[in-house]
Amino acid sequence: MVSQSIWGNALKKILHVVTNVAHYEDESHLTGLWLSELAHAWEVFAESGYTQTIISPAGGAVPLEPRSLKFPNYNAAAKDWHLDPLKMALLENTLSAGDVSATDFDAIYFTGGHAVMYDFPGNTALQNLTADFWEQGKLVPYNAQQEMIERGAGYSKALLPFIPHVVVDGNLVTG
């Protein structure tokens, strides 16, 4: 369950942001959405009754990171998503960051993984959308820890992977 002290009772609509990047500069080195980054969050929010929408910086198809579909990364949440045709269809033709408005959602959630470092930072529509969420006082969870560390952010994590650990600073939520 999502902590009510963080999310409150009125939160109903969550916007997930995923990547469009399919490969690194070397086109033979594939990347994409680290599926468990979306699947875990989606599962928790769904259990709490939230309406969820997926967008990507450019809109359109969302490639999957091949390594996220292999042991030990291919966990139950990722496997359940990957084997569900209705959920996989949500990744076939996403809206772009410019197609949605912060006023229509209560929070924005950025998936992590490697590929997001290539299309999240330079996308003006995504930057503007994020600023709108922030300026409207809405929650802005963020999960790309390496980029934050490189930019000087304080960083802490749970002792073991997948153990709950949340840090809240105003309306910025990480974990």
Image: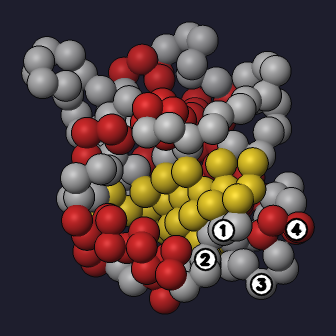
Query: Dot 3: within a 10 Å radius of its alpha carbon, few (fewer than 14), some, or many (20 or more) residues?
Result: few
Q: Give the vertical position of 89 relative to 153 (above or below).
A: below
Where's residue 104, x and y in %?
A: 50, 86
Residue at numbered disc 2? 138
Numbered disc in front, either 2 or 1: 1
Q: Measure how far apart labels 3 and 1 are at the Cα level.
A: 15 Å
Q: Measure how far apart labels 1 and 4 are at the Cα level.
A: 14 Å
Q: Measure how far apart labels 4 and 2 are at the Cα level.
A: 15 Å
Residue at numbered disc 4? 4
Residue placed most toward the observer, 152 or 145: 152
* Residues at discs 3 and 1 in contact (Cβ within 8 Å): no
Mark toward the start of the polypeptide (3 vs 2) = 3
* Residues at discs 3 and 4 in contact (Cβ within 8 Å): no
Name the side, left or right, on which 23 lies relative to 8.
left
Numbered disc in front, either 3 or 2: 2
Mark toward the start of the polypeptide (2 vs 1) = 2
Q: Secondary structure at mark 1?
A: loop
Residue displayed at 35% across by 41% down: 116
Numbered disc in front, either 3 or 1: 1
Q: Measure how far apart labels 2 and 1 are at the Cα level.
A: 6 Å
Question: Which kind of residue does numbered mark 2 sit on?
Answer: Lys
Q: Quadrant of residue 132?
A: bottom left
Q: In the image, which disc is placed on residue 171?
A: 1
Q: Measure how far apart labels 3 and 2 are at the Cα level.
A: 12 Å
Residue at numbered disc 3? 10
Question: Which kind of residue does numbered mark 1 sit on?
Answer: Asn
Name the side, left or right, on which 148 lies relative to 21.
right
Name the side, left or right, on which 151 lies relative to 97.
right
Which residue is situated farthest in the front direction here?
152
Mark toward the start of the polypeptide (4 vs 2) = 4
